[in-house]
Image (cartoon, grey):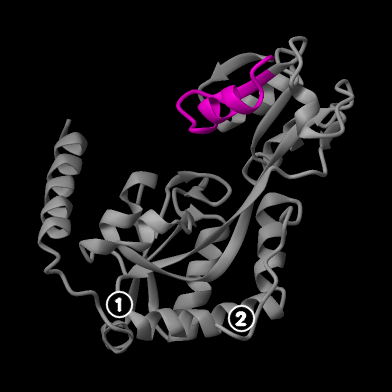
Amino acid sequence: MLRKLFLLAASALIGTAIAGQTVEARSLDQIIQAGTIRIGVNPNFPPMSSYGTTNELEGFDIDVGNKIATALGVKAEFVPTETAQRVPYLVADQIDISLGALTRSAERAKLIDFTVPLHTESMAVLTTDKVKAEKWSDLNDENITLVNMRGNWSVDFLKEKLPKPKVLLVETNADTVRAIAQGRGDALVENIDFFLAFTKNYPDVKWRVLSDTIFTNYDSIGVSKGNDGLRLFLNVLLYDLHTSEYINDTWKKWYGTPMMVPVVPNPFF
């Protein structure tokens, strides 16, 4: 109950800030002077970020966040930020930067600014050797059962693109992979990068990822609107982290496999 009241109060505060647009973000110099950078991460999104066995946050975003803090010469302060809170927390100056698989979009760009891409997420097909499909469109078959997570936007997207298959809706990302492993479903069509780690729980299943991706989104670091000093610093740092393979190596460390579509670093930004 107390947590619910806290979230309601925080939402009201952030809503007021968005409406008034009076909150000024901390500049790069102010962050360095303060000795900390506040980093928004999703605490329920393994292996991107989540609480580990020692009740400390861990994951890809945590490693990247600590790397950013080290480059700045400050301490990383990780702020638990659920998916829907990422943009509001930036607007309200509750965080300095947002991680958490923040996809660039024109709608979000009205409220916040983005760095160059940090990583990608590709919508593709995860299935097994029992399904003979070679392209995602081959799944448009009434004998196929697609598994998805209840509430995902992709549920409605796939109804239009693949109207013939049956649909099994489950509660969590892990449940989608479990359903396929147990034979209750045939395939998952989603941002597959975030699901592959769960396949390790079923080593006897011959998993397949179809090579044709439906589309690829580019996920960046979010910063407050107009905070160009911080954004440009992060762009320079991200170029170095990509060219040194730090991002790709850290991704493989946590996801167990390379990104389906790696980010190609570009020195011109």
**Image label count:** 2
User: Residue 239 bears which disc, if any?
Assistant: 2
Q: In which quarter of the image is the C terminus?
A: bottom right
Query: Residue 148, located in which quarter of the rendered image?
Result: top right
Residue placed at 23% from the left, 66% from the top? 93
- Location of residue 130 in the rendering, given as x and y in whole percent from the top left corner: 88, 20
Magenta stretch?
146-164
Question: How many residues crowd around disc 2 within 10 Å: few (fewer than 14), some, or many (20 or more)?
Answer: many
Residue that numbered label 1 is attached to: 226
Looking at the image, tell me whether mark 1 or mark 2 is earlier in sequence order: 1
Residue type, mark 2 in image: Tyr
Image quadrant where residue 124 sits: top right
On the image, the x and y values in percent for residue 22 come to: 11, 69
Q: Nearer the viewer, residue 101 or 206?
A: 101
Assess disc 1: are there few (<14), some (14-19) or many (≥20) residues with their C-alpha within 10 Å of its C-alpha. some
Q: Do the residues labelled 1 and 2 touch (CB within 8 Å)?
A: no
As drawn, 228 above or below 63: below
Along the line of sight, the residue nearer the viewer: 268 or 87: 268
Residue 49, visible in the rendered structure: yes
Q: Look at label 1 and name its amino acid.
A: Gly
Whether residue 3 is situated above or below residue 223 in the rendered picture: above
SS category of the residue bearing label 2: helix
Q: Element type at marker 1?
A: loop
Closest to the observer, 5 or 22: 22
Tell me the residue at 31%/49% (across/down). 85
On whether residue 22 falls in the magenta region, the answer is no
Which residue is depicted at the point 75% across and 56% down? 258
Spatial CA span between label 1 and label 2: 21 Å
